[in-house]
Image (tube, rainbow, N blue to C red):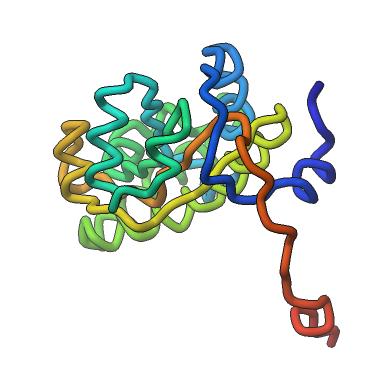
Amino acid sequence: MAMSVKQAMETRCSIRTYLQEPVPREDIEEIIRLTRLAPSAWNIQPWRFIVVTNKETKQELYNIANKHPQVESAPVAIVVTSDMEDAIANLEEFIHPSMPEDARAWLTNTIPKIFGEQTIEQRGQWGVAQSNIALGYLLIAIRSLGYDSSPMYGFNPYKVRELFELSDHVQIPSIVTLGRRGEEGREHHRHSLDKLIRYV
């Protein structure tokens, strides 16, 4: 049974040991369907997802991800990537079809100009910032369907690109493991609201 957003947020924690149960493809696709609803500036949506279920490929990923145990334990690993060059080259894919013609024309002219003044590296970092929004959605979507996850950043991006034959410009914000928990994670330990909020 699907959880509410509140339940998913309150019960999500990073899990490193998973039950050896496959995740049905329909559940994976529902998770990605929900994740793709994340907002992005100009609706550019630079995020892409490589879903790793093959045991041999997952073992290779484990070896280049600093041998994080959750990669080996989880039945699924999702490589979150960001491809700004593909996004910019395909403006028609993200400009809303109901947008007025003058607004469409403005976006079609403005977006290439803005990003054309940046380096590939600058565009890549901008895309990572947008894709991190989708990463947050991904973690909550996973938990909302009763699964667990662990986002990771300790990996060799060059070797990940090589493994999945990705272009050099493609950024990799995170690798996320997915499955049913085989352990209870730690309780949340977070800052107080007083530390986080400033009313003016």
Can you say which quadrant of the picture contains the C terminus?
bottom right
Up-down: is 142 above or below 1?
Answer: below
Q: Quadrant of residue 48?
A: top left
| Callout count | 0
Q: Nearer the viewer, residue 31 or 37?
A: 31
Kindly identify the residue that appears in the image at 62 percent across and 35 percent down. Answer: 181
Which residue appears farthest toward the bottom when viewing the image? Answer: 200
39 on left or right of 53: right
Kindly identify the residue that appears in the image at 74 percent across and 76 percent down. Answer: 191
Q: Where is residue 177 in the image (x, y as percent from the top left)?
A: 48, 38
Q: Quadrant of residue 31?
A: top right
Up-down: is 192 above or below 19?
Answer: below
Q: Position of residue 152 (x, y in %)?
A: 43, 52
Q: Nearer the viewer, residue 85 or 135?
A: 135
31 on left or right of 192: left
Question: Residue 110, can we see it?
Answer: no
Q: Nearer the viewer, residue 179 or 82?
A: 179
89 on left or right of 68: left
Can you say which quadrant of the picture contains the N terminus?
top right
Kindly identify the residue that appears in the image at 42 percent across and 33 percent down. Answer: 77
Kindly identify the residue that appears in the image at 35 percent across and 38 percent down. Answer: 87
Up-down: is 118 above or below 149?
Answer: below
Up-down: is 187 above or below 140?
Answer: below
Question: Residue 135, can we see it?
Answer: yes
170 on left or right of 135: left
Q: Nearer the viewer, residue 115 or 164?
A: 164
Q: Where is residue 90 in the image (x, y as percent from the top left)?
A: 34, 31
Q: Position of residue 27 (x, y in %)?
A: 60, 18
